[in-house]
Every structure is written in C-alpha cells, then in structure tokens.
Image (cartoon, rainbow, N blue to C red):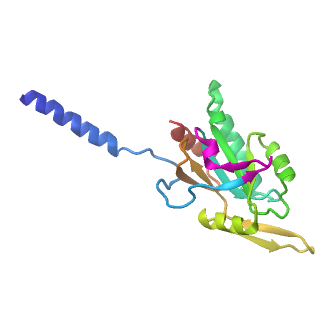
Amino acid sequence: MKKLLCVLGAVLILGACSEGKQAQFNAIDITGADYAKGFALTDHDGQPRTLADFKGKVVAMFFGYTQCPDVCPTTMTEMVAVKQALSAGGRADGDKLQVLFVTVDPERDTPAIMKNYMAAFDPAFLALYASSPEQLAALAKDYKVYYKKVDGKAPGSYTMDHSAGLYLYDTQGRLRLYARYGSSVESLTADIRQLLK
C-alpha cells in the first residue's frame, strides 16, 4: 500500500509539472485576449470569408495596403519565406499556413489590384476588404489597428499610416500571438511550427 501511494504521489507531481509547462513563443503571446476574435470580410475573388473558413490552418493576418512602399511588401516577402521554410525537407506544413492581407485603403485597393498583389507573392495568400468605411473602422477598432490617410505633395496623392504586425491564430481559430514588424523569418517559422503541433 505504501509503495502504491508513493507511485501515485509521483504521478500526480509529474502531472502537475507537465500541466504548468507552456509553449515558449518568440512573438507576444496574447492567448485568451478578448479582442480580434474573428471577422466577416470579402476576399479578392468576391467570396465572403470568416475565420472559420481556415480551420485546420494557422492564420497570419496583416493590415496594410497595396501601394505601401516598404512595410507591407517586406512583410509579405517574409511570409513567403516562412511558408517555404515550413515546407523545407519535404514537409507539407507550408500548406497549413494561410496568410490574410486586410486592406486599410479600399479606395484604391480594388479586388483586381489586390489579387494581382497577392499573386506577386503567393497565389494562395488572400487579400480581404471591408464592405464599407464604417465596417473597416469597426474592424480596426476590434483588432486595435491604427490607420490614417496622409495627404501627399501632389493633389489627390496620399499614403496610409498603419499599424504593422501580424496576428497569428492557431488551427482551431483561436487568437494566440502578435508578431511585431521586423520579426525574423526564423522566429515566425518556429512559432507557427508550435501552433501546428
């Protein structure tokens, strides 16, 4: 009996230790956050999209615009590299990553322009847009995303100031991580691999 109690005690201690062990991520762990839980947008092919459409995949969601001179193309290029790294060595993990690009400039970003923009990086990446300025504003508020139109020097020209970071959802559609702009391909790949486990 004494031996049995010792074994049970050891099992309980080991169980408690393993339960307390959490994954260590490179990005900011925002698991359980009460914002950015989902969306209802339209993709560049005119299809209505929600987070549920991508169940079984890790979703990387980024807010930007196609005429962005640096941050947006850099981020999309990095996500191409992440997808390639996930597929290295004959793995199929690259197919389990869905990159979503939400435009903050629907005035210029038509579906055709966004589709061509995504195709320049990866045809499987999807661009999404809100149905109205009000819907975009509500979405940005829910996602804690900043965006603002900034007039250029020429009449009618402008740029968009905007937040630069990626929201990462796990395969069950749960918000898990926020990766700041400038996160390395290696750190993003490592985090996504953990989310795929």
In the displayed structure, does residue 4 sit left or right of residue 15? left
**Residue at 61% in and 51% down:** 183
Residue 40 visible: yes
Q: State the residue at coordinates (61%, 33%).
A: 93
In this view, the residue in front, 41 or 94, is 41
Determine if residue 27 is in view. Answer: no
State the residue at coordinates (83%, 52%): 111
Up-down relation of residue 72 to residue 137 (above or below)? above
Residue at the image position 74 percent from the left and 62 percent from the top: 104
Farthest residue, direction top: 90
The residue at the far right in this view is 155
Residue 171 position in % (x across, y down): 55, 41
**Residue 157 in the image: x percent, y percent?**
89, 70
Q: How many marks?
A: 0
- Image location of residue 116, percent across then percent down: 85, 47
**Image: 55 above or below 165:** above
Q: Quadrant of the N terminus?
A: top left
Look at the picture and state if 16 lies above or below 160. Answer: above
Residue 16's place in the image compared with 3, above or below, is below
Q: Quadrant of residue 156?
A: bottom right
Task: Please report the bounds of the magenta region as a residue range.
Answer: 42-56
Residue 46 shown in magenta: yes
Outermost residue toward the left? 1
Residue 5 forms part of the magenta stretch: no
